[in-house]
Amino acid sequence: MCRFLLYKGKSPVLIADLLTRPAHSIINQSYDSRLRLDTRRPLNGDGFGVGWYESERDESPCIFTSTLPAWNNVNLTRLAEKIKSPLVFAHVRASTAGLASEANCHPWQYGNLMWMHNGNVSGFDNIRRKLLATLSDELFTFVQGTTDSECAFALFLNQLEDPKGPRHTPEELKEALLQTISLLNEWTREIGITEPSLMNFAVTDGKTVICTRYISSSTQEAASLYFSSGTRFESYKPGHYRMIKADKREDIVVVASEPLTFEQADWITIPTNTLVIITPRFNVLLYPIKDENYNPHSRTKAVDLSCVYDFKK
């Protein structure tokens, strides 16, 4: 099960403050994941990727990927100490579909859009041909790898009226992502797949961020996902960070498969089968995904993070 995080801030963050410096950074999660559903494979060592937006002059993201384990890539460590960005996607991979290759590493880019996924589409090999057949010619040739995640991105792009357009409204991105989930569920049901799919997706156009915590089941929990927001994200001693809430403003939003800090009050669990929108104005909006798997009576189990991490003030 992969791990990912995303950061959106009014001010750029040094990527090292997300990727390498926190004691439970995304890189440390690649070999010390605490909240995976699949505990049989504790390592996320099948490659990694980080994507970021540099400036207003260039609205397309820059992406660095490698098939090396994230904890063993000196170039990632060097870059993280030099690059600052107001919007960062990072991902460490544990493959469920596709070989270890750079073409299969998250995140992916198309125009100004960037995408990553934690989970798997059950029975993907049996619906891959059908999925690809629905794509436009341009999006069909866009797919270079063999993962369910990249194909899901192409399917998402196919739901947009103009996937290379300079601007996408939050509502447009939301509806395209919900339609992507709906189609994947429809096709897996048609071939009799009963194992649920895990679809924690994240997509951004550099302004809006949309992500989901989703499982195609009305009774089971989706893969873990948390968010934290505030005015400053800072270190108070080596390896230890906290989210400062100086006032009611939301200047920073971080979404992560696992908390990066040891401050339990920093993190809010995103409920299972929920879509999250971070608007260009930093509003954080949560919507229940009301499809055939919607269960209004279900409640996401509260995880006592102090039992998972050694929280120290």
Image: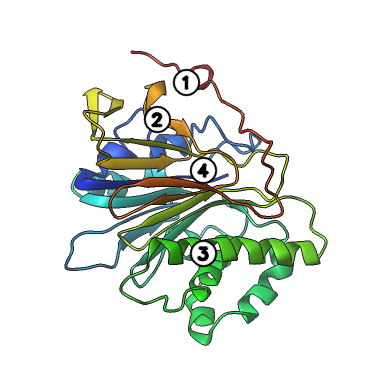
> Are dots 1 and 2 in contact, CB under 8 Å?
yes
As helix, strand or loop, the secondary structure at mark 4 comes to loop
Placement of the C terminus among the 4 image quadrants = top left
Residue 151 spot, x, y in % from top left: 56, 68
Identify the disc placed on residue 309: 1
Identify the disc placed on residue 175: 3
With respect to residue 233, does 156 lie above or below? below
Work out how far the residue at label 3 is from the one at label 4, CA to CA, in angstroms: 31 Å
The residue positioned 56% from the left and 71% from the top of the image is 155
Residue 84 spot, x, y in % from top left: 20, 49
In the picture, measured across the screen, residue 221 lies left or right of residue 104, that is: right
Work out how far the residue at label 1 is from the one at label 2, CA to CA, in angstroms: 9 Å
Work out how far the residue at label 4 is from the one at label 1, CA to CA, in angstroms: 19 Å
**Sequence order check, earlier mark of 3 and 4:** 4
The residue positioned 69% from the left and 36% from the top of the image is 297
**Sequence order check, earlier mark of 2 and 4:** 2
**Sequence order check, earlier mark of 3 and 1:** 3
**Sequence order check, earlier mark of 2 and 3:** 2
With respect to residue 157, does 266 lie above or below? above
Q: Which image quadrant for residue 98?
A: bottom right
Whether residue 98 is visible, yes or no, is no
Residue 48 spot, x, y in % from top left: 43, 51
As helix, strand or loop, the secondary structure at mark 3 comes to helix
Amino acid at dot 2: His
Amino acid at dot 1: Tyr
Q: Which residue is mark 2?
A: 24
Q: Which residue is mark 4?
A: 44
Instruction: Work out whether residue 94 or residue 160 is closer to the camera in this orientation and state it.
Output: 160
